[in-house]
Image (cartoon, rainbow, N blue to C red):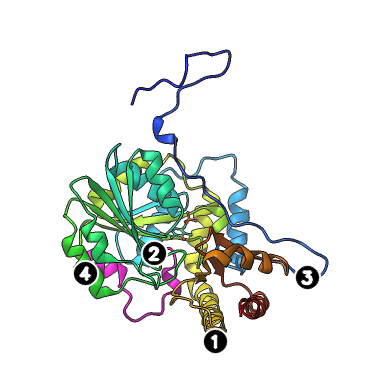
Amino acid sequence: MTEVHGESDVETGVVRLRDALQGVPTYKPGRPPTQSPDFVSYKMSSNENPYPPLPGVIEAVARSAEQLNRYPDMGTAALREAIASDVGVSAEEIVPGTGSSGVLSAIVGATCEAGDEVVYAWRSFEAYPIMVALSGARSVQVPVTEDGRHDLDAMADAITRDTRLVIVCSPNNPTGPVVHTGELERFLERVPADVIVVLDEAYLEFVRDAEAPDGLAVYRAHPNVVLLRTFSKAYGLAGLRVGYAVARPQIAGPLRSCVIPFAVSDLAAKAAIASLEAKPELLERVEALVGERTRVLQGLRELGYDVPETQSNFVWLPLGSRTQEFAEAADAVGLSVRAFGDEGARVSVEAPEANTRLLQVAREFAERLR
Ligand SMILES: *Cc1c(COP(=O)(O)O)cnc(C)c1O
């Protein structure tokens, strides 16, 4: 633990950093698409919302910009009130942060010390192993099933006395499916009461599966469940970095102390509040994206691709060793997709023209595979 990395030598700039930093994976952001005069390029690699912010949201941000010389409201009181009334809980139960990633990192910090274990499905959200490694805790990754679903029985089996946190990502990024109510309830019965279960609902608004759990009902029934939500996806505010957790006051209070002071800028808070006020309009956009998702999923399946069910704003193509080749083929026509090694490619649902072009690339690629 106290290993010194070489002699203490100020002149050569040798400083001591925590051992835990070794082996922290680096986050690979989705690549921007190749630009060409021959085509309009589309970024389909980061699960962003293709719609620009509503005019009312931009106005709220512009008004807030006039006060950039001031610190934001430390307690983010108005934001917490707005979120609480939208979710149907009290403001005491809301923990806002710099994106839901910022909140999750506070949750890991609040629960884990070196040697503790965090159980989650894999492959899942890339930020999980990074946050766990940074804390010095150990990731226990439980493989998803062949159809990209959480194996909740295996996850329950993986819980030990050292487990301090479990993350359930539903819908799962990057594979797409949700967990179902019955299996989640059976799973939660097996989790010790002193272990926090984070239900990461980043894509909640895109879910149409009737068997998907009602997160709030699950939260109400289980004091150790924490919901994690974001304004980055359905609400289209990825660039502003604002998300939140819903947790019991006894958990939420300490969590708020783990979030760095002034984590949420006033721009972000005002944009989030304006977005909640414009919720019906934003949900219409989500509905259009869900329609496009259905078209892309069906199109790919008709072409013979083995695409898992998706309840999010992306599809997963388990292409194995052909993954990079597919990503290159998409890139050649101005579409950037997210390739994960030799596992598969995740493609975000974009504007209709981009989705149509993706299906075209997939058709040509399928012919090449024959
Ligand atoms: C995009 C995403 C988030 C949200 O990240 P923000 O920090 O809120 O932008 C959280 N969890 C998952 C699984 C995601 O895909």
Q: Earlier in the sequence, mark 3 or mark 1?
A: 3
Q: Are marks 3 and 2 in contact (CB under 8 Å)?
A: no
Q: Is residue 203 magenta?
A: yes
Pick the front one: 217 or 135: 135
Q: Marks 1 and 2: which is nearer the front?
A: 1
Question: Does residue 207 lie above or below 242 as drawn?
Answer: below
Q: Amino acid at mark 3?
A: Phe
Q: Secondary structure at mark 1?
A: helix
Q: Amino acid at mark 2?
A: Glu
Q: Identify the magenta region.
A: 202-220
Q: CA distance from mark 1 to mark 4?
A: 34 Å
Q: Which mark is residue 39?
A: 3
Residue indicated by mark 4:
185
Question: Does residue 26 lie above or below 333 as drawn?
Answer: above
* Residue 76 visible: no
Rendered residue at 21%/63% (across/down): 188
Q: Marks 3 and 2: which is nearer the front?
A: 3
Residue indicated by mark 2:
201
Q: Earlier in the sequence, mark 1 or mark 4?
A: 4
| 311 to the left or right of 38 | left
Pick the front one: 15 or 368: 368
